[in-house]
Image (cartoon, grey):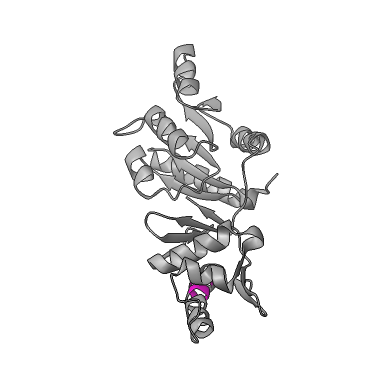
Amino acid sequence: MPTRNEITILLVEDHQGLREMITETLERLGYQIDSFESSEAALEVWPKTSHIAILDINLPGENGLYLARKLREESPSIGVIIMTVRNQLSDKLAGYDAGGDVYLPKPVALEELDAAIQALARRIPTIQIYDLWLQSNTFKLSNRHQESLTLSSNECRLLTAFTLAPENRLEYWELAETLELNLDSDTLRSNLEKRISRLRKKLDTLFPQSKTITALRNYGYQLNLSVHII
């Protein structure tokens, strides 16, 4: 089970004071929080890396039930906690039907909210902690602190190939095929080194604690990060 500082949470609550209080409390416990005041704001910039979402129902614009359905479509493994003043049975059934895993009537003790988050984290087997996230359609690369940068198309292809390769290793010929380079060229090795170096510098920016890509003598290169491709 991941520790609190490895769990990312999407919080959508339109009451500013409550949103700030929940954010501050959960961050103090170690969670990583992305908070928004509306469904539209959340969907516009949501990085799709959240493990758990905490949603109010009564939101301006599209309500929390709409958002729960969209999140479930975009990220089927996400845990969804619905937190609302609506306490009728019909409201609860609608919440579960929309994709909610836990329904908490307001006001909610923050200790109970923390317990619900922990329970979901234990129950969701697909929670996996990645170093970086790659959005393949936009070439956007992000880390767990929501820092991001944009790769070139070739860098995106290269990182994707590394991620899908066994043990994240690629031989020289595989790199050449990925980048559509001439395998028989006398400058292949130096050309690959330059391209790997450019990608490594971007990876180092988002994950500076380790050697992100290492050279394997007379073989190729190895990626030393876990990357989730979205």
Q: How many numbered discs, if any?
A: 0
Evaluate whether residue 168 shows in this view: yes
Q: Residue at x 60, y 48 (%)?
A: 7
> Is 29 on the left or on the right of 185, as rendered?
right
Name the dominant secondary structure of the magenta segment. Answer: helix
> Is 210 on the left or on the right of 58, as rendered?
right
Q: Residue at x 44, y 63 (%)?
A: 156
**Residue 41 vertical placement versus 130 (above, below):** above
Q: Residue furthest front?
A: 184
Q: Residue at x 65, y 38 (%)?
A: 125
Q: Residue furthest left?
A: 61
Report the span colored magenta: 199-203
Q: Residue 104, how many percent across, how many down?
A: 54, 26
**Residue 54 vertical placement versus 166 (above, below):** above
Evaluate whether residue 56 shows in this view: no
Q: Residue 173, how many percent across, how many down?
A: 55, 71
| Closer to us: 185 or 137 | 185
The picture quadrant where one finds residue 63 is: top left
Q: Is residue 182 magenta?
A: no
> Is 124 on the left or on the right of 139, as rendered?
right
Q: Residue 87, how many percent across, how many down?
A: 48, 18
Q: Residue furthest right?
A: 1
Q: Residue at x 37, y 57 (%)?
A: 138
The picture quadrant where one finds residue 62 is: top left
Q: Quadrant of the N terminus?
A: top right
**Residue 47 vertical placement versus 152 (above, below):** above
